[in-house]
Image (cartoon, rainbow, N blue to C red):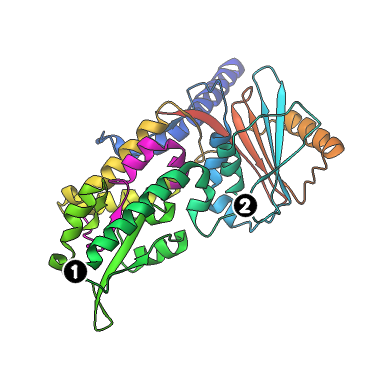
Amino acid sequence: MILSALLFRNLFKILFASVSLFACNLIDKTANLFDDNSWKDLTCDTAQYVSELKIYTLAQPYYLADTLLKQALKPRNIYVALADATGNIQTMALQAAGEEAAQLLETKAFPTLNTSWEEQAYLWALVKQPNYLYHRWENLLIDERKIFLEKRDSIVAIMKEKHRSIKVISDLRSTSRQLLYLGKKRTATPLSMHNFGLAADVAIYTRRKRISNNLTLYRPLDSLTEAYGLTWGGNFVGFVDSGHFQLYKNGAELLRKHPELVFEFEPFRPQYNRWMNKMIGLGKENKAEDTKELLQELNKIKQDQPCQCVNMQGKTPYALMEKIQTALANSDDYQYNNDLLLVGDLASQTVTLVSAKNKITFPLGLWK
């Protein structure tokens, strides 16, 4: 009897552990059991082994997320530690207190983790948000913005021959203003080409009054933008914007050229999903083709890449954490109460975020 009870208890533990292991998978896939549309969210499958970790995987889940926003943190520095499957550790650090750009700090406790400027931008985004996203990605977009501005000015000059009052009324746009417009239904998307400096709005005035609802008046922009290789907002299907034109057809085309920008689009996936579901519910899926294409492109970029399963709690590797924190404190001026620490551990397949107010561990998986 005692033996049977012990066997039952151990069997229960095994079953419980198995359910926990796949909990992230089950939670994420519930909505997709009867629907395999390619734009639907991928699943962070924790049954898959992660063999390599990158800064993007560590930083992305916390960007614009409540995990950090609710803590209202103002860290001095951001520390990153990556431990491979055999326990070898590499570290890097950024000064978080500056205003202009990320500044690398020297770390001595462990071998240095080499990072690109894009990876430093991902980390910097956790603590600093520029007024314009373009400024974060200027190294990536500066040449295209220059080309776009030249084309914009040429188009406006041609339009002035018939409408002397035409002028540019919107160029760079902050994320906060874009979201304000979204709330007022003046746009259908939480991110715009304006945010990346690759779009412009023009307006024609009569007696100092802006004319904005006369599609015929702005129709010449159709052929002009086509001639200059741009996209006219008057041809948008879901949200016609007659005074708008941009360098890329849509967000998906931008991501195909610059997949690094998936970092900016991913936090707004819930809004894009809601728009898709709304249009499908109204029987107007054709009016959300650009959104569908964007979500499909996000999935293509993420497919089979490492992820953190933020729907379930992971087991914190306490011994590793103590080793890293002690060494950083002794050699690199790491301060638990003032700094942010991200630790990726391939041995335990976890990522741990340590701040003055919290310690959170999530299990790793692959997007499937």
**In-image side of 69 versus 103 (left or right):** left
Residue at the (24%, 61%) spot, across then down: 158
Residue name at image x 55 percent, y 20 percent: 51
Name the kind of residue labelled 2 in the image: Val
Query: In the displayed structure, would residue 329 be above or below residue 225?
Result: above
Q: Classify residue 172 as left or right of residue 125.
A: left
Q: Mark 1 points at which residue?
A: 162
Residue that mark 2 sits on: 127
Quadrant (top left/top right/bottom left/bottom right) for the N terminus: top right
Instruction: Name the one closer to the observer, 91 or 20.
Output: 91
Q: Distance between the residues labelled 1 and 2?
A: 48 Å
Hey, which quadrant is residue 239 in on the image? bottom left
Looking at the rendering, in which quadrant would you find the C terminus? Answer: top left
Locate residue 23, reporting x and y percent: 46, 33
Q: Does the magenta stretch include residue 239?
A: yes
Quick check: 74 above or below 301? Answer: below
- From this viewpoint, which residue is outermost toward the bottom? 207
One can see residue 311 in this view:
yes
What residue sits 19% from the left and 69% below the top?
162
Q: What element carries label 1?
A: loop
Which labelled disc corresponds to residue 187?
A: none
